[in-house]
Amino acid sequence: MKVLIADKFEKSGLDGLKAAGCEVVYQPDLKDDALTVAIRDTTADVLVVRSTTVTAPMLEAGSLSLVVRAGAGYNTIDVATASKRGIYVSNCPGKNAIAVAELAFALLLALDRRVPDNVADLRAGKWNKKEYSKARGLYGRTLGLLGYGNIGQEMARRAHAFGMPIVVWSRRFATGKDNVASEPIPLTLAKSPEEVAEKSDVLSVHLALAADTRGLVNAAVLGKLRPGAYFLNTARAEVVDQAALEQAVRERDLRVGLDVFANEPKDATGAFADAMTSLANVYGTHHIGASTDQAQDAIAAETVRIITSYKDSGKVANVVNLAKKTPATHVLVVRHVDRPGVLAHVFDRLRSGAINVQETENVIFEGAQAAVARINLDGKPPDGLLREIYSGNSDILDLHVVSI
C-alpha cells in the first residue's frame, strides 16, 4: 500500500508505516496544484494531511481510497467529494485533547495574571508591581464550556482542580444520548450558548466547525457575558463572529485568549495582520494548540493504526463519512450452502429487478458448509422475483424478506 504524506509528520509515524509494509512517499511541503499532481503521479492509495487543504480536484486526480487527517477536525477536506467517490475520510479524535486544553488553560492563567504584559515590561526595564498585583484569581469563578467533547472534558478536569464551577452547553447532552449525572466532574447544564455565557466568568469554546456551528458565538452570546469577563477560543475562528468579538472587546472590556484567527497564513511562517491582535485585552498564540511532542506522537501512532488496519483487514477506524442510515427498506435473508456462485446468482437476479443492494454480510457456520447472507435492499423484491431467486440455484436452502 502506497501512502503519500503531504504535511509534517513525526518520524515515529514514518517508521511505523514502513514497518507495517507500506511504501511511504513523504513530501511535507505539497499543497494546491503540486499536491494534485503528486496524488496523480504517485498513484497513492492513502493520503495523510494535517492542515493542508484537500480539494475535489485532488480527490479526483488519482486512485486514493483513504484520506487520514492527522488531527481531530476535518473541515479542510472536501468530505462531500470523497463520499461521492467512495473514499474513506478518517481522523484522530482525542489524541491532541490534552495539549489543546493545556494551552487553553495557559491562556486563561495568562489573562488573569497578565503574564505577557509582565514579561514585556520587565524586558523593557520597567518594574510595576503596583499595576500587576491586580488580579481576580480563578478559584470560585465559573467556567462556561461551549462543547464537551474530548477537549472540553480535559478542560473541565483542569478547571475542577482549580476549584472552578463548570457550566456546559453541548449537543451530546441535548440529544439525550448522554446523562450529565454519569460524568465524573460536577457539571451544570445550560439550555443554550446564551445561558452558558450569562452564567460564566470565563467562556471557552471547544466546538468543531460545521454548518450549524459556524458563527454560533455571535453578538447575542457575547452580549450575555458580564463586562470584564474572559473569553477563550482554541477551536476554530469560524465558530465565532469576529466582528462581534472585536466589538465586545472594545465596548464590554472582555479579556480574550485566542489560538485561532480568521485569516491565518497557509505557511508555518510569514506576515500576519489581524485587528484582534492590536487590542490590549487580547492575548494570542500561533494556532499551536495541538503542537506538543506528546500530542504529535499520539496522533502519529493513531494514524499508523488506522492505515495498518486498513491495509491488513480493509477496515477503517474513525471514519467520518459513512452513512449513519442507508436508504435500505428491506433485508433479504438467504440461507445457503457455502459454495461459489450463490451470491452472484442472488445479486444478478436483484439487478434484473432494478433493486439496489445497500449493504451485505455473509456469516459462515462452523465447518464452512453453510452460511447466511443478510442483504440490505432499497426496495421489497416482488414475490415472483423471490421465487426466481430461490428456484434458480439449488444451493439456496431458504430465503425471506424482513422490513426495516
Image (cartoon, grey):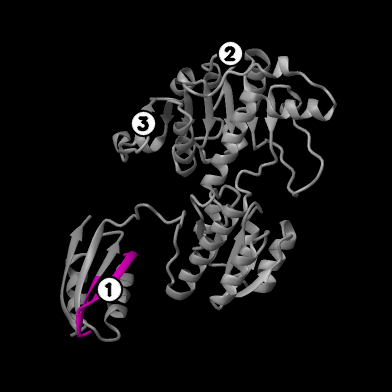
Q: Secondary structure at mark 2?
A: loop
Q: Residue at x 53, y 53 (%)?
A: 79
Examine the rendered structure and indicate whether residue 214 appears above or below residue 390: above
Question: Does 241 appear in magenta?
Answer: no
- Residue that numbered label 2 is attached to: 227
Amino acid identity at mark 2: Pro
Asked which quadrant contains residue 110, the reply is: top right
Amino acid identity at mark 3: Pro
Q: Position of residue 231 (x, y in %)?
A: 58, 26
Tag on residue 186?
3
How busy is the neighbourhood of tag 2: few (under 14 within 10 Å), some, or many (20 plus)? some
The Cα atoms of the two marked residues, 2 and 3, are separated by 26 Å
Q: Secondary structure at mark 1?
A: strand
State which tag comes first along the sequence, 2 or 1: 2
Q: Quadrant of the N terminus?
A: bottom right
Q: Secondary structure at mark 3?
A: loop
Task: Tell me if 356 is positioned left or right of 44 in this view.
Answer: left
Q: Residue at x 72, y 29 (%)?
A: 116
Examine the rendered structure and indicate whether residue 267 appears above or below residue 202: below
Magenta-tinted stretch: 354-373
Dot in front, 1 or 3: 3
Q: Is residue 354 visible?
A: no
